[in-house]
Image: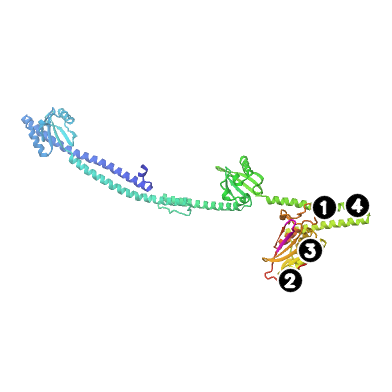
């Protein structure tokens, strides 16, 4: 209730304070004036009554002195009282009323028990000059000694009705004045308070706008120095806050951009190991979504207890911890670094994940490559060493044996030379340091000439070759020697893995702006598990590695096709043959078309 009565605004409280103060001041002053006026009126009336009582006492004293009896004085007192409209009474030393201007003295009885009467009799008996005043039942009573009559008292009394009426009238005037003054004071207080609180209210609105994030607001300084300084200080504060917020937003945007585009995965967790931030790289490594991971415990979001243990170890030690983790859900391998960060009132943990799956795979490929090269080099070198040691032991003196051994040594050296040449050729292709000698050539000529170069080997293997080239194929711009090398590698592989009586089919057609060439055989085929690896260096489907060749042909073919902007792939089924296909894009916007009939060569 009290809160509802008190105004809630500064303006209202100032106006109410001034109004209440003015009312209290006017009422206090009015009360003082009312008492003062009443006292003045009663004092004046008492003086009049005192004079009238003295006049009646003098008349009664003179009559008593001349006649010596008290009976005639009652009439005298009535005559005097009727002339001055005041009640007069004469009281003897015993307190008996001997004369009264209004009533019969015998009916009034003895008044010695009244305090004012007893005091007046005592004053008269002492012979002192003075008067006794009292108020009783709305009457003002003044008693004085009767001259020359010891113990006798003359009393004058009148009603206070007129005095009370005058005082009440004056009191109403004071109340009316207090109300008018209070109203004027409130109006003035509201105006003055408005002038004071207006700028404060404007500042409040601007402060609320700043609290809502509207930092471009600006308050107008008031004319008064203090409020003007306050508005200017507020504007300065707002500008500083705006600058700080802009700087913070810029820093946050830069950090978010860096955080989002880091190649390494980053996970930020709080002291309870709850994920509070994760970037795209970490999501890719963990194979999850941001809106699912954030807000969950790390062990739930990452689905890996080793990562959780690494973080807890860093928390307990207070130092950076690292480990290589085999991530079970995806089979990836990543290096994880956990770093605790202590801030005011909180502890954060930062996990950095680096995917090393491909690096580990490349390391495995490198080790396998070294092992393959070592194997490919060891076999001919061991053969050469054995042959040379045999010759050194005396076989060189036998012309027939030495000639055969030297022929074998030359063959092994040729094999080593071919291996080194293919390795150099593959290295140049992989480093893209090969310059292509492009020429425009008809597909019929390109494919048929390449296939015909292996006719002797096909005949020895008792196989059949069929070349099927679609008619009307436009010329294509390629490095003829390199593409023939690809074709020879594919046909040579088909010869090696096809049984006698089988067939090899070389086909070509145009598809979606590409020249497509396929080599299909009826050989032993390749297992589906080995198909993704057939283009790797030194990879052989023959686990015993007894087949001829270095295992680099398909890798070289793949790079040759790729540097021409094309693609190569394989399809196979064990026991039903293999098909290698490569596609080369046409370079000429208006290719030269050679009309030719389909060709089929059967051997």
Q: Is residue 106 above or below residue 238?
A: above
Determine whether the residue tagged by mark 2 lies in a helix, strand or loop: loop
| Marked residue nearer the N-terminal end (4 or 1) | 1
Mark whose residue sits in front, 4 or 2: 2
Q: Which residue is mark 2?
A: 597
| Marked residue nearer the N-terminal end (1 or 2) | 1
| Marked residue nearer the N-terminal end (4 or 3) | 4
Where is residue 318 shown, x and y percent of the image?
A: 62, 41
Mark whose residue sits in front, 1 or 3: 3
Determine whether the residue tagged by mark 1 lies in a helix, strand or loop: helix
Asked if one can make out residue 415 in the rendered structure from this viewpoint, the answer is: yes
Mark whose residue sits in front, 4 or 1: 1
Highlighted magenta segment, given as a residue range: 573-583
Q: Which residue is mark 4?
A: 392
10 Å crowding of disc 4: few (<14), some (14-19), many (20+):
few
| Viewer-side residue, 559 vs 18 | 559
Query: Where's the N terminus, which quadrant?
Result: top left
Q: Is residue 561 above or below residue 134?
A: below
Q: Does the magenta run of residues contain 261?
A: no
Label placed on residue 326:
none
Which quadrant of the structure image shows residue 540?
bottom right
Determine whether the residue tagged by mark 4 lies in a helix, strand or loop: helix
Asked if one can make out residue 440 in the rendered structure from this viewpoint, the answer is: no
Label placed on residue 379:
1
Q: How much space separates mark 4 and mark 3, taking CA atoms?
A: 46 Å
Determine whether the residue tagged by mark 3 lies in a helix, strand or loop: strand
């Amino acid at each position: 209730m009290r809160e509802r009565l008190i105004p809630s605004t500064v303006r209202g409280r100032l106006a109410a304070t001034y109004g209440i103060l003015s009312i209290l001041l006017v009422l206090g002053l009015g009360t003082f004036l009312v008492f003062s006026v009443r006292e003045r009126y009663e004092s004046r009336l008492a003086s009049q009554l005192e004079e009238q009582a003295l006049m009646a006492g003098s008349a009664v004293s003179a009559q008593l002195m001349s006649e010596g009896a008290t009976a005639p004085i009652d009439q005298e007192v009535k005559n005097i009282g009727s002339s001055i409209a005041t009640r007069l009474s004469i009281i003897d030393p015993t307190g008996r009323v001997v004369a009264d201007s209004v009533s019969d003295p015998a009916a009034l009885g003895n008044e010695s028990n009244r305090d004012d009467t007893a005091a007046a009799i005592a004053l008269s008996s002492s012979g002192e000059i003075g008067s006794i005043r009292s108020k009783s039942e709305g009457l003002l009573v003044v008693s004085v000694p009767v001259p020359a009559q010891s113990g006798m008292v003359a009393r004058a009394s009148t009603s206070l009705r007129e005095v009370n009426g005058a005082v009440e009238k004056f009191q109403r005037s004071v109340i009316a004045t207090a109300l008018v003054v209070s109203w004027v004071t409130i109006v003035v207080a509201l105006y003055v308070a408005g002038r004071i609180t207006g700028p404060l209210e404007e500042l409040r609105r601007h402060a609320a706008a700043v609290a809502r994030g509207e930092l471009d607001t600006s308050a107008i300084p008031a004319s008064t120095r203090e409020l003007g300084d306050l508005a200017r200080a507020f504007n300065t504060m707002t500008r500083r806050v705006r600058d700080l917020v802009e700087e913070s937003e810029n820093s946050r945007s830069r950090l978010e951009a860096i955080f989002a585009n880091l190649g390494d995965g980053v996970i930020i967790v709080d002291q309870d190991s709850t994920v509070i931030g994760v970037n795209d790289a970490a999501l890719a490594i963990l194979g999850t979504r941001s809106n699912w991971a954030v807000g969950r415990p790390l062990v739930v979001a990452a689905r890996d207890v080793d990562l959780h243990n690494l973080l807890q170890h860093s928390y307990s030690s207070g130092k950076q911890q690292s480990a290589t983790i085999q991530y079970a859900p995806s089979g990836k391998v990543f290096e994880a670094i956990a770093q605790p960060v202590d801030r005011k009132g909180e502890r954060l943990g930062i996990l950095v994940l680096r995917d090393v799956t491909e690096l580990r795979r490349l390391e495995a490929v490198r080790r396998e490559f070294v092992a393959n090269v070592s194997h490919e080099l060891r076999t001919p070198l061991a053969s050469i060493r054995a042959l040379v040691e045999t010759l050194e032991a005396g076989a060189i003196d036998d012309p027939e044996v030495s000639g055969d051994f030297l022929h074998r040594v030359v063959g092994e050296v040729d094999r080593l030379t071919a291996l080194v040449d293919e390795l150099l050729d593959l290295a140049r292709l992989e480093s893209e340091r090969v310059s292509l000698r492009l020429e425009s050539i008809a597909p019929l000529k390109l494919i048929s000439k390449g296939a015909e170069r292996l006719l002797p080997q096909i005949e020895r293997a008792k196989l059949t070759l069929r070349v099927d080239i679609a008619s009307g194929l436009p010329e294509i711009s390629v490095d003829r020697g390199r593409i023939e090398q690809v074709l020879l590698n594919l046909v040579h592989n088909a010869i090696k893995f096809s049984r006698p009586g089988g067939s090899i089919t070389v086909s070509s057609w145009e598809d979606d702006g590409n020249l497509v060439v396929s080599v299909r055989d009826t050989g032993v085929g390749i297992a589906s598990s080995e198909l993704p690896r057939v283009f790797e260096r030194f990879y052989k489907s023959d686990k015993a590695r007894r087949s001829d060749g270095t295992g680099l042909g398909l890798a070289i073919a793949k790079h040759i096709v790729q540097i021409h902007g094309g693609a190569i792939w394989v399809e196979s089924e064990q026991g039903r043959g293999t098909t290698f296909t490569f596609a080369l894009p046409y370079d000429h916007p208006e290719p030269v078309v050679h009309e030719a009939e389909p060709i089929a060569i059967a051997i």
